[in-house]
Image (cartoon, grey):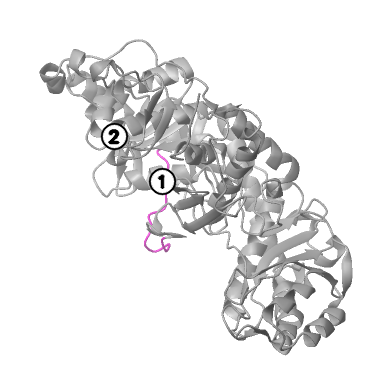
Amino acid sequence: MAGSGVPALRGDAEDLQALLQSIDGRGYKAYKAIAGAWRYPDFIIHIVHVQGDPYAAPTRVRVLLEPGVAVLPVGAFRGLARRLGTAALLARVFADHARATSTSKGTGKSGEIAMEHPGQKVMPQTAVMVDADGGVEARFTVGLPADGRRVKGRAAVELMNVDVPAVVRSTLFAAGHDVQDLERHASANEDASALRDALEPLGLVAFVAEGARLPRRSGIDDEPLPENEAVPFRAPDSLRVEIDLPNRGRVAGMGVGSGVTLIVGGGFHGKSTLLRGLEAGVYNHRPGDGRELVVTRNDAVKIRAEDGRSVSGVDISGFIDGLPFGRDTSAFSSPNASGSTSQAASIVEALEAGSRLLLVDEDTSATNFMIRDRRMQQLVPKAFEPITPFVDRVRDLHDHSGVSCVLVIGGSGDYLDVADRVVRMVDYAPEDVTDAAREVAARLPTGREPARSEPPVAPTTRVLARSTLDARLRNRARYVKVPDERTLLFGRDTIDLVAVEQLASRAQIRAIGQALAFVADLLREEGLGLPEALDVVASAITKQGLDALDDRLVGDLAAFRRFEFAATLNRLRSLRVE
């Protein structure tokens, strides 16, 4: 059985009905009596935690379906990638159906049935899990009916014995789905994972399939732009690659090789849209998203400037050195970093976490970090400029450290001198203009002098100081809240994650918050190297799933990469390192 196993049963659905009827009209806390597991004819309902008030967080519920009951086709759970694709489909359909059919049954959240929606991306999550035998576990919330602050027993019986079973049977059983739809979701996820696995052997860092639909509806809506409004992607012949997949067979698209790749072009022609597609390519996507076969190495990290962020003990001397008054940058700390220092720190932090692919957009970068042209070099000599611009580091990063970079460049032609390939976007269509770019670079030399010749210093391992993380707040041993799409409340700290662009959902942020609390528990005993802390969390999740981070059997967690976890940890203003 999926998830955390089958609890001891208290009775059947009729027993639960009798209990609900017996507490009708009593104070709302009488609902506490229904906690536990109950056998229904075709599944088990486990009431994990009962809300104490009709306005409080709703009651947490698990539903467990045995393999022979769910009757999923073997193809829906043959292999991890297929199971994840199937689970995402079931969660999406359950969440949508619950939202559409929930009706108010009294005060507060009475009658509400809700599940964490997986969105467009596919990743391990706790809303729905499918195990290797085809068993299904779903986790969601229900608002137990109240009249003021009194139990509405009859309405509760209708909710738990009519409404919830109806949603479960129409969404979690194979009979509630078209068999072809189940196969489509399972096979699409398997193909995306296989495609990503194929990148490194082919010397690629990313792949964008022919016909991909990259534009989104808006900056806050991850749904694809309608087909009649989006330009389908077409690969330039010189960058065209064909790859065999287990289900679709041979697919063609643009392969992005290792090294330094520039995406150039005029404004509004699709440069940033392509980069955002590559950013999202670290995740798999649901069928119909348009990015099902847009994949990027899973260690790709988007880098940007972030004025005002905190930095703790990061060696940025490879980019910024020789500050006025002899200030050392080999262990740089600041509660209010500038654009250039924040961008330098983000690169070093990404490398420390293990990234070997950086994604950079000129529009969200610090200008003085990206480039110093010949005129500025003449006016402000190197002796008075502590910044080594990225244009003088990006080549060394690849040649000496194996770190590739994809950059969107609209105004800094100096980068043509260091590029392995140049892709120009015209009306959302890519063209390989590498040869033309080299001709331009040779014909129009910039005359600037590289700031340094030696490679950047490798990141030094930082050790998290004991008790640097504290998840406690007042009488709570662990306070983790996600008030919006880009903020994490952790203990007394508020962590701003606006600039961590590859975060996919609030469920991910919740899981990261619980992971920080997990590390905080370890740090009470001894210090941990930051990479070691990332490894410990990853190992725990691999062995026990996301429940390793939160044993309350919640349904609102999603898997995260070590890079977003590290980025969150690095933005904790109370962070102290040794």
- Residue 276: image tag: 1
Look at the numbered disc 2 and give the secondary structure of its residue. loop
For the residue pair 107 and 78, the one nearer the viewer reads as: 107
Which residue is rendered at x = 61% and y = 38% of the image? 519
x, y percent for residue 570: 47, 36
Q: Which residue is denoted by mark 2 in the rendering? A: 338
Say if the magenta span includes residue 229.
Answer: yes
Residues at marks 2 and 1 touching, judged by CB atoms closer than 8 Å = no
Q: Nearer the viewer, mark 2 or mark 1?
A: 2
x, y percent for residue 374: 15, 20
Look at the numbered disc 1 and give the secondary structure of its residue. helix
Corner quadrant of residue 391: top left
Corner quadrant of residue 54: bottom right
Three-letter amino acid code at the position of disc 1: Arg
Q: Which residues are magenta?
A: 225-236
Three-letter amino acid code at the position of disc 2: Ser
Left or right of 194? Residue 46 is: right
Which residue is rendered at x = 29% and y = 31% of the image? 340
Say if the magenta span includes residue 377.
Answer: no
